[in-house]
Amino acid sequence: MPFRDVDVSRNEAAAKELVRKSGQMGVPVIDVNGTIIVGFDRSRLVRALGIRG
């Protein structure tokens, strides 16, 4: 499954987009087709990706 890794500590525009989407400055933030997941939450990732975990 393709993905894009963005280092928000080096990309100010991406950092602003992260805050706009998630409402916070914490990382990681994962956007799965518009579903925003803050932090590493395996069960939410599995559901968002539609895979069996």
Image (cartoon, rainbow, N blue to C red):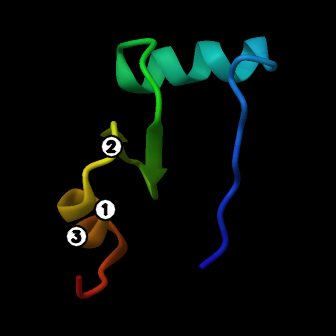
| Circle 2 crowding by C-alpha within 10 Å: few under 14, some 14–19, many from 20 | some
Q: Which disc, if any, is residue 18?
A: none
Q: Amino acid at mark 1?
A: Leu
Quick check: 38 left or right of 28?
A: left
**Which residue is identified by label 2?**
37
Labels 3 and 2: the sequence-earlier one: 2
Judging depth in this view, the residue of 53 and 21 nearest the camera is 53
Q: Quadrant of the C terminus?
A: bottom left
Q: CA distance from mark 3 to mark 1?
A: 5 Å
Mark 3 near mark 1, Cβ–Cβ under 8 Å?
Answer: yes
Q: CA distance from mark 2 to mark 1?
A: 7 Å
Q: Amino acid at mark 3?
A: Arg
**Which residue is identified by label 1?**
45
Quick check: 42 left or right of 13?
A: left
Badge 3 element:
helix
Q: Where residue 38 sits: x, y (%)? A: 33, 35
**Which residue is identified by label 3?**
47
Q: Quadrant of the N terminus?
A: bottom right
